[in-house]
Image (cartoon, rainbow, N blue to C red):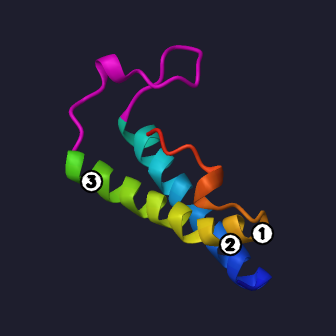
Amino acid sequence: MEKSEIVKNLNALFKKRSEFYSFFDENIEKLQNTEVFDFKNAKDLNAEEIYKLFYHYDYAIRKILPAIYKAYKITNVDLEKDF
């Protein structure tokens, strides 16, 4: 994968990450004087909307992984698949 494609994928990843966290910022208050979300007192959220945002963020991550694996010669043997 060319550097320009990797940079494009990284920018897409950072954009999707920002959109994902912006959703929480817009819908969940933070605990007083912190950057910690107050999930306990959060209003009900639309699970489908959360999933859609997460899916796009996760997809952007998965799209860049092959280039990272190739650059660092990472194979399945290197990875702990205990998740």
- The residue furthest front is 77
- Is 14 situated left or right of 73 in this image? left
| 52 magenta-colored | no
Label 3 neighbour load within 10 Å: few <14, some 14-19, many 20+: few
Where residue 51 appears, x then y in whole percent? 30, 52
Question: Where does the magenta region start and end?
Answer: 28-46
The structure residue drawn at horizontal position 78% and vertical position 81%, both measured from the top left corner, is 3
Q: Which residue is mark 1?
A: 71
Q: Which residue is mark 2?
A: 67
Q: Which residue is mark 3?
A: 49
Q: Earlier in the sequence, mark 2 or mark 3?
A: 3
Label 2 neighbour load within 10 Å: few <14, some 14-19, many 20+: some
SS label for mark 3 = helix
The structure residue drawn at horizontal position 55% and vertical position 61%, both measured from the top left corner, is 61
Whole-angstrom CA distance, mark 2 to mark 3, is 29 Å
Whole-angstrom CA distance, mark 2 to mark 1, is 6 Å
| 42 magenta-colored | yes
